[in-house]
Image (cartoon, rainbow, N blue to C red):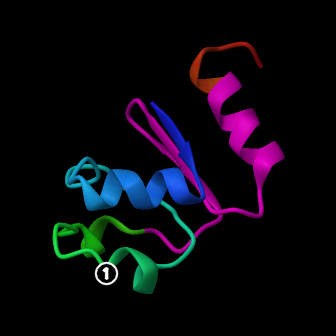
Amino acid sequence: MAAICGAVDYLGKHEFLNTYQHAGNSLETLEQFSEYNSKFYFVSRQAIKDQNLVTANRTVALEFAELILKRFEFV
């Protein structure tokens, strides 16, 4: 699975990030959702891959795409 920008917020709001290290626009944004319980998994990086999940903030579309391609061993 891969999520960037608001899609990371969606995953956080619906508790999909609970067991994955993840990036996002900001920890403060994610903490606005009462369902988000993953602050210790939040990584202050622009993009990250953990297991089968790639997440990124809104500023790094190319790095996000590169991590996805690496995940599927295209690069």
- The magenta span reads 43-69
Q: How many marks?
A: 1
Quarter occupied by residue 74:
top right
Q: Position of residue 72 (x, y in %)?
A: 60, 15
Q: Is residue 54 above or below residue 72?
A: below
Q: Is residue 39 above or below residue 67?
A: below
Whether residue 22 can be seen here? no
Residue drawn 46% across the image and 68% down it? 43
Q: Secondary structure at mark 1?
A: loop
Q: Position of residue 71 (x, y in %)?
A: 57, 24
Residue drawn 51% across the image and 78% down it? 26
- Whether residue 65 sits left or right of residue 56 in the image: it is right
Q: Position of residue 27 (x, y in %)?
A: 43, 80
Quarter occupied by residue 36:
bottom left
Q: Is residue 3 above or below residue 42?
A: above
In this view, the residue in front, 14 or 53, is: 14
Q: Which residue is mark 1?
A: 31
In this view, the residue in front, 75 or 12, is: 12
Q: Quadrant of the N terminus?
A: top left
Amino acid residing under circle 1: Glu
Q: Is residue 41 above or below residue 71?
A: below
Quarter occupied by residue 52:
top left
Q: Position of residue 46 (x, y in %)?
A: 65, 64
Q: Quadrant of the C terminus?
A: top right
Is 58 contained in the magenta span?
Answer: yes
**Residue at the right extreme, as displayed:** 62
**Residue at the bottom extreme, as displayed:** 28
Whether residue 35 can be seen here? yes
Is 13 contained in the magenta span?
Answer: no
In this view, the residue in front, 59 or 9, is: 9
Question: Would you call the spot at circle 1 few (<14 residues within 10 Å), some (14-19), or many (20 or more)?
Answer: some
